[in-house]
Image (cartoon, rainbow, N blue to C red):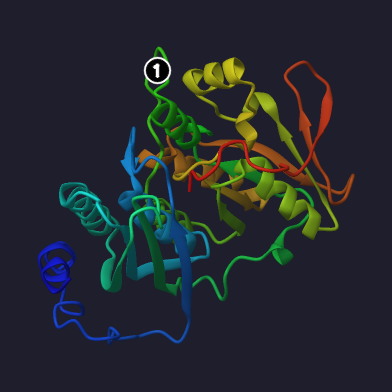
Amino acid sequence: MNDLIKEMFVRAFKNRYLEKLPDAASISWDTPTMAFTTDSYVVDPLFFPGGDIGKLAVCGTVNDLAVSGATPLYLSAGFIIEEGLKISVLKRIVQSMAAEAQKAGVKIVTGDTKVVPRGKADKLFINTAGVGCMHACVKEAFISDKIKNGDKILVNGHLGEHAIAILSARNEMHFESEVLSDCACLNGLLDKILQKHKRVCFMRDITRGGLATILCELASALELGLEIYEERVPVSTSVKGACDLLGYDPLYLANEGKVMIIADAAESEDILRTMQNHPLGEDARIIGEVVQDHPGMLICHTSIGSKRIVNMLSGEMLPRIC
């Protein structure tokens, strides 16, 4: 275990906080307001088109901090490894984590490793925690209290790519055009938005349960209604085809590089342009708005001109994809 920690994890995540292997990382702090999050990752399969469980763990934790209005700084990583997992597989995942952390500008400063008997885990589970400092313009993590009638709903790109990538890898399904997971760290995009625009009311990363689930949760917390327009929701041709074939609704599919933003109507077009000028927001759209009608409900204007109530997803379309 000592060799594994030093040769695998310390070598990959090398930084001054980690290299002495203390029981707790001692990190400097220059701001009175911090953000703190934790998450666990149990994706099956470990590798999928566009990513792997290691990249997913970094991106998911970074994004939870970023959509809260924080700049991610430090991560922890706990590995629960099933006996028999190949060292080459673990090394590939650890290197992927290191590369994504470096790309996002965060450091993995502490962690833990446990090996459990064969059959007591499914190859590899990863638990993370993340710490960041809040942007100067953000007093606290975004909550629904700031949302008002007329605010616009934006997303930064095509929905459902992560879920379909996992499905294709898990079941060896081959579509005419390969669908890659959108797994990506959003902190660079969101930093630009928060630096330039002061009228962001709410942000949430669109993960398990998809766009519909987070909007339904949000609507239930408001004394206002939400409306979206089906034709404005960005969905790639490949994902749309897979959904038509398999009977899925892209509104409920998981993503790992998508954010939903609610912003003041007066600044929404400017925010949209900022998103579209970033590689992770080229396909961004304004997809709906906040309304006074039907408080607590999410309504979708369909492509055929009708309206339908969008309810919370009951159960899971796909198990274990985040």
Q: Residues within 10 Å of mark 1 (few under 14, many from 20)?
A: few
Figure quadrant of residue 248: top right
Query: Is 78 placed left or right of 301 in the picture?
Result: left
Vertical side of 46 occupied by 31: above or below: below
The residue located at (74%, 48%) in the rendering is 216
Looking at the image, the residue that sits furthest to the top is 176
The answer to whether residue 246 is left or right of residue 108 is right
Q: Nearer the viewer, residue 3 or 287?
A: 3
Q: Position of residue 122 (x, y in %)?
A: 39, 50
Q: Horizontal and vertical percent for residue 144?
A: 70, 62
In the picture of the structure, the residue carrying the numbered disc 1 is 174
The amino acid pointed to by label 1 is: His
In screen coordinates, is 87 left or right of 273? left
- Tell me which residue sits at (31%, 52%) in the image: 54
Location of residue 177 by image quarter: top left
Identified at 43% across, 52% down, the residue is 42
